[in-house]
Every structure is written in structure tokens, then in C-alpha cells.
Image (cartoon, rainbow, N blue to C red):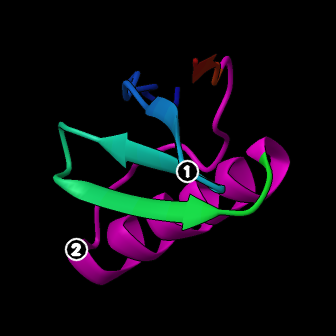
Amino acid sequence: MKMQVPLPVVISKEGKWFVASCPVLDIATQGKTEKEVKENMEDLINDYATEKALPFPSIVRNCKAIP
């Protein structure tokens, strides 16, 4: 059985950019659209998990932008 670990991701709009951060992992990224920042965060979480050899899930779900 695979263990799933929920990771909170906060997305906000700062000027022309969407910024996503994951406080638990202390990582952040940006994108020109909400879709792009979600994809960037998913890639960043996967890279983090690979680098640290951690069994984190590879799917980012339920991300919502904060106006």
C-alpha cells in the first residue's frame, strides 16, 4: 500500500505572476498562468522528492489561487 502525504500548496497572484509555495518543503516557484504555476510546482515537488529520495506523491491536486 502506498502512503499518501498531503502537501499544502499556496498560490497567489503577485503582479503579472502567479506564485506557488509549499511551506512544508520550503519551496516556491512562479508562472505566467495558474496552470503553468501548478505544473511548475508539481515538477518542483517531484524533483525535491527525487533529490531527497522521499516517497512523496507525484500529483498536485486541489490548488487554488488566492486573489
Residue 36, located in which quarter of the rendered image? bottom right
Label 2, secondary structure: give it. Answer: helix
- The residue tagged 1 is 15
The answer to which of 22 and 15 lies nearer the viewer is 15
Tell me the crowding category of disc 1: few under 14, some 14 to 19, or many 20 or more residues within 10 angstroms, Cα based. Answer: few
Marks 1 and 2 in Cβ contact (< 8 Å) = no
The answer to which of 49 and 33 lies nearer the viewer is 33
Secondary structure of the magenta portion, mostly? helix
Q: Earlier in the sequence, mark 1 or mark 2?
A: 1
Separation of residues labelled 1 and 2 (CA atoms): 33 Å
Tell me the crowding category of disc 2: few under 14, some 14 to 19, or many 20 or more residues within 10 angstroms, Cα based. Answer: few
- The residue tagged 2 is 52
Residue 28, located in which quarter of the rendered image? bottom left
Residue in the picture at 18% in, 37% down: 24
Residue 31: mark? none
- In the image, is 30 to the left or to the right of 50? right
User: Which three-letter amino acid code belongs to the residue tagged 2?
Assistant: Lys
As for residue 53 lying within the magenta part, the answer is yes
Compared with 37, 34 (above or below) is above
Question: Which residue is outermost to the front?
Answer: 15
Q: Position of residue 14 (x, y in %)?
A: 49, 46
Residue in the picture at 46% in, 64% down: 29
